[in-house]
Amino acid sequence: MLAGMSIPSTGPAIHVRGLEKSYKDLRVLRGVDLDVAAGSIFALLGANGAGKTTIVRILSTLLRADSGTARVDGFDVATQGAEVRASISLTGQFAAVDQILSGRENLVLVARLRHLREPGAVADGLLARFSLTGAGARRVATYSGGMRRRLDIAMSLIGSPPVIFLDEPTAGLDPEARLEVWQAVRTLAEGGTTVLLTTQYLEEAEHLADRIAILHEGRIIVDGTLAELRRLLPPATVEYVEKQPTLEDVFLAVVGAKGRDRG
């Protein structure tokens, strides 16, 4: 997990041009271009092996591109790695939390490592922001998958990074936990954080993203808002049919409105 602070950029929060990456004879990225506006949620959608994680690793300075340019929060990822790392947070596919500690102790530990003043107050604020106050004193080992993921995202925000990368944050979660994470991601954007989200779930991109890019065989083949992407298809034929509840409607009706600090 990487987090920090930086001077805000006046351009796009993320600017990528001609990004290429190969592993021996395997061309993973074949000239990727994308821009992410500050304070928005940008979904990078693609199947397993499409190159989503490779892009995130390059943008977070964990991997060097073969060619092309990329800037994050105004800093070049190839020549200003320290500045980039001070501007971002990266949350990978598995929650990086200490299950022996309580939720609050995890947050306090990271705040102290970041040399922040009043780490306890920082922890309490994040617990409240992500609806974990009631579970803050409990060991993380007792948390549900959704709660652990929310705590992981909360830890990523310590130091107020302007840009956060979420690499398939709901992979392996059950439907209820996935909905919890979706709300946490919306909370990030409402607070002004720029979010680049990778996912292979179509409904996740549809529910969360301001803009969606589809990555296929190492290239961005389409990039736009959901409305713009829908216009790529022929106009829908209007038919009058009885509306059936969606699976999400059924799930929420059966489970009921539960408190998010459940055990």
Image (spheres, rainbow, N blue to C red):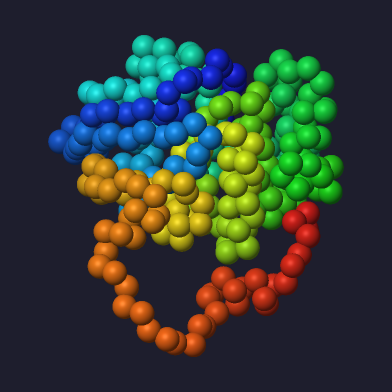
Relative side of 95 to 138, left or right: left
Relative side of 116 to 192, left or right: right
Q: Position of residue 65 (x, y in %)?
A: 28, 25
- Judging depth in this view, the residue of 256 and 11 nearest the camera is 11
Does the image show residue 52? yes
Image quarter where the N terminus lies is top right
* Number of marks drawn: 0
Residue under the image location 58 percent in, 26 percent down: 161
Residue under the image location 28 percent in, 34 percent down: 33
- Judging depth in this view, the residue of 259 and 107 nearest the camera is 259
Image quarter where the C terminus lies is bottom right
Query: Which of the 4 quarters of the picture holds residue 234?
Result: bottom left
Query: Which of the 4 quarters of the picture holds residue 220?
Result: top left
Residue under the image location 82 percent in, 21 percent down: 118
Q: Position of residue 261 (x, y in %)?
A: 78, 54
Does the image show residue 63? no
Above or below, 62 relative to 180: above
Q: Position of residue 73 (x, y in %)?
A: 47, 22
Relative side of 96 to 65, left or right: right
Residue under the image location 59 percent in, 19 percent down: 5
